[in-house]
Image (cartoon, rainbow, N blue to C red):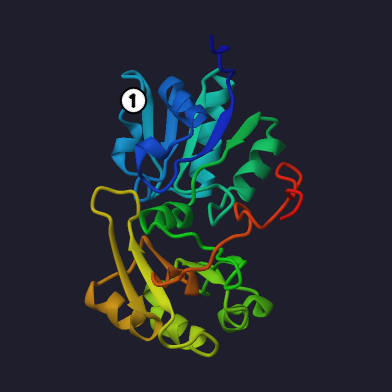
Amino acid sequence: MNQPIKAAVYIIGAGPGDPELLTLKAHRLITQADTIFYAHSLVPRQILQDVRPEATLIPTGSKTLEEIVPSMIEQVRQNKVVVRLHSGDLTLYSAIAEQMRLLAEAEIPFELIPGISAFQAAAAKLQTELTVPELVQTIILTRISGEASSVPEEEDLASLAAHKASLCLYLAARHISKAEEKLLQHYPADTPVAICYRVGWQDEQIWLVPLNKMAAASTQHNLIRTTLYLISPALNQSLSNRSALYNPEHAHLFRPQKLGS
């Protein structure tokens, strides 16, 4: 039987949009919360389909940090269970560091509950493994400098592209021509790109194009937000590379080499 939930702020990653991709813990907290602050432009309403009828829902898309955090603090001091609902996973572009700092300064308890990131959901929809033996073994999660946030010079997209890894590009739809130009400095023009719009939402769409058509396709479909780009040689559907893990010629701790083989 579940223990009673104590009054605190529970910062939850809601995942990419599909309510069935919520963790069990996230769902339990959402269904028992007294107050839910949610980024309504990024979190679809179906994520909130099981909330208590008496729960208070507060959309935060038009609010500032100075409005959101004091309100959360007040709710907890009234002995309420507060959920702060973000999209995706909390470790990626969620702007939670400043929220946690203010909560800690006010001596308000909080807990983080991770979620599934859009890149994981997109790879699953594409039925793709982003790390392929002898081809690519690194995944880079990054963004391009925009109006709200600048990327450190040493993390410039062109320098990351030099690794030719599986690159997951967030928050880039408004700057996709510049991103394409930087990526083409190192990736071949025919490198597969998955353009993933609102992954996990009911109106999800995914297009597979070569890198040199990425910007044109984004413009064609009028993509300006909630779009993730996966750039990777692993998206080549004709690959036949095989991992050694389950290869009969590969021995390891749980499958010793057979004598005579």
Q: Residue furthest top?
A: 1
At which x and y percent is residue 107?
70, 30
Tell me which residue sits at (61%, 77%) in the image.
Answer: 160
Give the answer, above or below, for where 79 lies relative to 139: above
Considering only vertical position in the picture, is 102 above or below 175?
Answer: above
| Residue 163 placement, left or right of 16 | right
| Residue at horizontal 64 percent and vertical 42 percent from the top | 100
What is the residue that sits farthest to the front in this orientation? 260
**Callout 1 secondary element:** loop
Quarter of the figure with residue 69: top right
Residue 73 showing in the rendered view = no
| Residue 29 in the image: above or below residue 94 | above
Badge 1: how crowded within 10 Å, few (<14), some, or many (20+)? Answer: few
Q: Nearer the viewer, residue 83 or 107?
A: 83
Q: 211 or 73: which is nearer to us?
A: 211
Q: Residue lying furthest bottom in this view?
A: 185
Residue 142 x, y percent position in the rendering: 55, 67
| Residue at 53% in and 69% down | 166
Identify the residue position indicated by label 1 in the image. 50
Number of marks in the rendered image? 1
> Could you tell me which quadrant the C terminus lies in?
bottom right
The residue under label 1 is which amino acid type? Asp
Vertical placement of residue 203 versus 206, above or below: above
The answer to whether residue 231 is visible is yes
Where is residue 240? Give x, y as percent. 47, 68
Give how far across and how far down residue 140 sits, in percent: 58, 67
Q: Quadrant of residue 165?
A: bottom right
Nearest the eye: 190 or 73: 190
